Image (tube, rainbow, N blue to C red):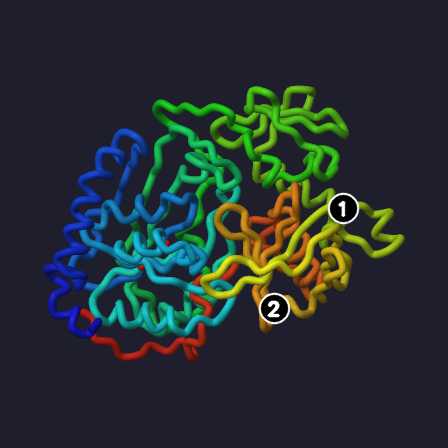
Amino acid sequence: MLSNMAASAPRWHGIGPARWLGWVLALALLWPMSRFVWRLRVRGAETLPRDRPYLLLPNHTSLMDPVWVALHLGRPTHFMTSAQLFRYPWVAALIRFFGAFPKMKYVKDRESMATVAALYDAGHTITIFAEGQRTWDGRLLHIGDGLGRLIKRLDAEVVFARVTGGHIHQPRWTTRMRWVPIDIVYEGPHRYPESLSAAEITADVGKRLAIEPHPELKGLTWGRRLAEGLPFFLFGCPACGQLRALAVSADGDGVGCSACDAAWRMDLRNVLRGTHGQADLPLTEASDLLQAHLGSPPVANRDRYEADGTVLSGPQASVGRLERGADPVPVAEGPIRLDTRSLHVGDWSLPLTEIVATSLQVAGIYQVRTTDALFQLSPGQDSTYMWSCFLEAWRSSSAVALRRPPGCPPDPGTRSQPDPTDADSGDGAPRPHGGEPG
């Protein structure tokens, strides 16, 4: 069927009149919001190809990124989207209609890679968020070499979409939205020379997509309860390192530490302004300071770690086994403890060597994948982000080559992240194609 789309791509872009009409109606409804609610400020859209395939590569700052980057393409696009979203039937139906197709994270998903190749050959635009997940603080997450291999294999034209402000409009750690302008800069089309390796291509993509995490905000801005939800991400005090010590103030705009009395007020640029003699801290710096307190790999309590090897513990958690298209099947419930070798919940234990990957999904759902199973971990009142940081760090084979989950406080210059295009794609050599997607 996809091969038959190519002939009609210039007029309908291969999607048929029904979906084309849906796109037109969606644009008509969303365009006023783009001007007056999101206040999108766009540059470079006039250079985008209208009649040939390309890969659109945006950075990922917000749940709204797929809408924002698609509004100005002048044509429909397909989206590589987390398979987690397809677990909900009505969501799956809606996003499929607008061109989404699933990608299983942390595994070699040959089906999704075949879909990308078929769509590209048929003359389509495919949007791939190179980082694989949204940023926590504005910094670009690690991009795997699988993206470079895919670009080489397709010999693809690429367009970069650099979104600034989405992580401030609604930070990943809160449900609150702020009224700030969103800037989108399209760059391309660009085709990489065959002489570049997959790693070199990936590195260049990262350079082109990086943004300033704390940008100057021009024009009218507004927000309230700016610190609400912050302890989910900043799960310890950046001043003293005490875990679970930060609490949001009554007005929602500040956080304070119950252990050392440090306090800050959050501003719209995600900068913590010190109030009790504390220095101002950009959120990125606060995150790095917390990591420095915890060490690498992180330890919650050094005395207990020296006594019995416990890295992190909590009073209550539950584990469920996930089957395709079904709710989690209960596996264990009880106190949770992580040591240097295993994760323990009640009487259930999982050796860290059996963990293939971990993933923090939409709504804070934390998944742990082994070679033969997928589990969902719910650590009670604790931040799933905190547990993801500790578990991913300690499952690593070496503290020197430490791998971290998306957005965890990094070692300088490093940041680990799932590869959205991880698949067997040969050696990256270009393949013949017949041409010329959250």
Whether residue 205 appears in this view of the structure is: no
Q: Secondary structure at mark 1?
A: loop
Percent of width and height locating residue 44: 25, 46
Query: At 42% from the left edge and 79% from the top edge, which residue is drawn?
Result: 426
Question: Residue 284 appears at what percent x and percent y?
Answer: 57, 40
Mark 2 is on which residue type? Thr
Left/right placement of residue 156 relative to residue 241 reads left
Q: Is residue 174 above or below residue 129?
A: above
Density class for disc 1 (Cα within 10 Å; few <14, some 14-19, many ≥20) is some
Q: Residue at x 39, y 24 (%)?
A: 221
Specify the amino acid type for callout 1. Ala
Looking at the picture, tell me which residue is in the foreground, 333 or 216. 333
Residue in view at x 54 percent, y 53 percent? 360
Say which of 328 and 199 sits in front.
328
Query: Between tags 2 and 1, which lies in front?
Result: 2
Q: Report the side of 91 relative to 105 (left or right).
A: left
Residue 331 in sight from this viewpoint: yes
Q: Which mark is residue 327?
A: none
Quadrant of the rendered structure where residue 272 is?
Answer: top right
Pinpoint residue 376: horizontal percent, then vertical percent.
58, 57
Residue for badge 1: 300
Residue highlighted by disc 2:
370
Q: CA distance from mark 2 to mark 1?
A: 25 Å
- In the rendered structure, which disc, 2 or 1, sits on the residue that comes first in sequence? 1
Q: Secondary structure at mark 2?
A: strand
Q: Residues within 10 Å of mark 2 (few under 14, many from 20)?
A: some
Look at the numbered discs 2 and 1 and tell me whether their residues touch, using CB distance below 8 Å: no
| Residue at (72, 59) in percent of width and height | 343
Quarter of the image with the N terminus is bottom left
Q: How many marks?
A: 2
Q: Is residue 415 left or right of residue 5?
A: right
Tell me where residue 117 appears, x and y as whole percent: 31, 71
